[in-house]
Image: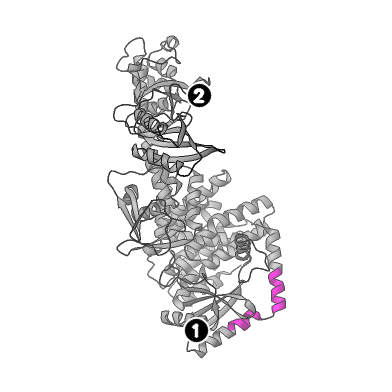
Amino acid sequence: MLRQYELIDRVLSYDPDADEALLNRAYVFSVNAHGTQKRASGDPYFSHPIEVAGILTELHLDDETIATAILHDTVEDTVATIEEITRIFGPSVARLVDGVTKLSKIEAQTENERAAENLRKFLLAMSDDIRVLLVKLADRLHNMRTLHHIANPDKRRRIAKETMDIYAPLAERIGMYEFMKEMQTLAFAQLEPEAYQSIDRRLSQLKEGGGDRIAKIGSGLKLLLSRHGVEADVSGREKHPYSIWKKMAERHISFEQLSDIMAFRAIVPSVEACYEALGVIHRRWQMVPGRFKDYISTPKRNGYRSLHTSVIHADNTRVEIQIRTEEMHEEAELGLAAHWAYKQDKVKPETQVSWIRDLIEILDTAESPEELLEHTRMAMYQDRIFAFTPKGELHQLPKGATPIDFAYAVHTDLGDQAVGAKINGRVVPLRTQIENGDQVQILRSKAQEPQANWMNFAITGKARAAIRRHLRHKEREETQALGHKIYDEIVQRLPAQIAGDALAAALKRLKLADNAALMEAIARRRITDAEVMEALMPGSAGADSMRELPPQSSAISIRGLTPGVAFDLAECCHPVPGDRIVGLRRPDKGIEVHAIDCEKLVSGDDADWVDLAWGDKTEGATGRILVEVKNEPGALGTIATIIGAQKANIVNLRLDNRDTGFHTNTIDVEVHDVQHLMRVIAALRAADAVSAVERV
């Protein structure tokens, strides 16, 4: 454990103007507050916050951050209070300590909920002051270094998994690669001990067999660059075990087949020298295709800059080389911490924390811990691509992103109103995947709104959160509107008119907050019609037949409601406008719309029936037909031509049966109404290539 004078000397070595008295007070306060508390290792508890502070001195962080690290466990684990911290150390340090403390108060929940709640508090605190994150990462790193002292193996694995899922990716995201690598290695040793030991053993064997191979290659690289006038500081290392194991898993290869386990770094004086060194290296050794990355002209989202290349060295050995300046190297080692070093102006660079704002926006819309983790893991793990607006603005997106993701990355309103896209000047569907370097133009309409099927191809957390938010709002509005219509029909079935205050009294009896909650409960059948009648007029429900359909004149119109939101068109009978329809209401589900002659209606389940009508000017739907065609060239083309000539659209086609003379196809056809569907069927029956057509 660092002694008091050793810790303060470390801070003064890089920041002579640091508040020495503040650090002394913090050290003494922490030691006294933790007193005789012990860690699992048997060491005094206060050794932990002191070591965390020591880790942060390696990042050359300011005195307030070091003091926060020393004090970070006092409020949670001792009798100390935030008010006391404020009085002794000032409001700034107290605010940081409070932020770190809040991150640590994780309630006993399921594994996903615990991780998600951790991340939620984490990011909310981080959005206020990035130093809270830096202290927490150092705290987690030291806990991982001492994890082996915990006796319970399940607890060790839980902490290791949490580190691998959340803390290591966050360290990577803000550019703190050394933190990330050490966390991954320590977590990997706990989660996959056999794989870790196997790789570690083979790396040791390579060192023993290869002697000073890394040193020789590094010296040769330095000499090569020097001969061509490029002075460089060259260092080499083997990749860490988790990185090796991940590549083995991704490529499905053995350790012996993995050729690029050595990595070298060349630090040169200027950006120009970076590219000059790259040219020298590529002239000397063959480059591995697809392995060159220019993060100087297009930095990573966390601000990381460097040139990456892999070459075929002697004995067909793949060698990875990174080329960067000293400034780039400092930022790569420290990440965002470099911008909080004592010598800086302590200004948080907005360009480097834009991804944090995206995640904060997701936090506001995520309704469950699982949804939160889905978005944040998605944002952290996926590889990035670069795409441009027509004006040349650069946007980074995950690999596999579509124009919908791009639109929401530019602005939420643009995403909501997207109707199409142009990629490199060519009109494409919204589900088209964007490639690196594409120019993307979003076509928009104020009449457009997010569609449910966008969830099938939107992959960024920001896009999915915005789509979900809109769909939830729309579903709530339309469900309440449908509930109003059902409520009016229920009132008509009462034996007498209700008094003006009957609805308010019913809400009290049903223990519902307001009218909106009642209408949603009715539409979702969280309460039955009989319960509503009884609440409105006690004693009225017994005489009502809940299975008997009301007269056609009282049928509830579904005009203006969206299929798939307030109601679902049944897949079994594919009703279209013009069909006589009925709805099935099941507890906590939307209404399922069936044609009146659907066989499923006689299944005898406990669903409530509600008489429905399409309403005037109802938008079209999809009808399903079974078409038997002759097995001859051009028959399928004839069917498509006939359907197109009838102004209908094929949305799905499936070959069900094939024999020598005939093929049977199931075709889903988008039509205006039932009359339109009948015209399509009649036209098909008149064709020579068609032997039979029937509606499913």
Q: Nearer the viewer, residue 340 or 499?
A: 499
Quadrant into which the N terminus falls: bottom right
Q: Which mark is residue 600?
A: 2
Q: Position of residue 49 (x, y in %)?
A: 56, 61
Q: Is residue 70 left or right of residue 538?
A: right
Label 2 crowd (10 A; few <14 / some 14-19 / many >=20): some
Counting every numbered tag in the picture gives 2
Q: Is residue 305 above or below residue 471?
A: below
Q: Position of residue 237 (x, y in %)?
A: 60, 75
Helix, strand or loop under label 1: helix
| In this view, the mark in front (2 or 1) | 2
Residue 493 lies within the magenta run: no
Residue at 68% x, 69% y is 256
Residue found 60% across the figure and 65% down from its top: 243
Q: Residue 624's image quarter?
A: top left
Residue 215 in the magenta stretch? The answer is: yes
Q: Is residue 266 above or below residue 554?
A: below
Name the foreground residue: 56 vs 420. 420
In this view, the residue in front, 531 or 663, is 663
Q: At numbered mark 2, what does the secondary structure look like: helix, strand or loop? A: helix
Q: Work out whether residue 80 can be spotted.
A: no
Q: Measure the C-alpha gap from mark 2 to mark 1.
A: 74 Å
Q: Amino acid at mark 2?
A: Lys
Q: Can residue 23 be seen in this snapshot?
A: yes
Labelled disc at residue 280? 1
> Residue 363: where, in percent of width, then height?
43, 48
Mark number, residue 530: none
Judged by its main secondary structure, the magenta piece is: helix
Q: Amino acid at mark 1?
A: Val
What's the magenta region?
Answer: 202-218
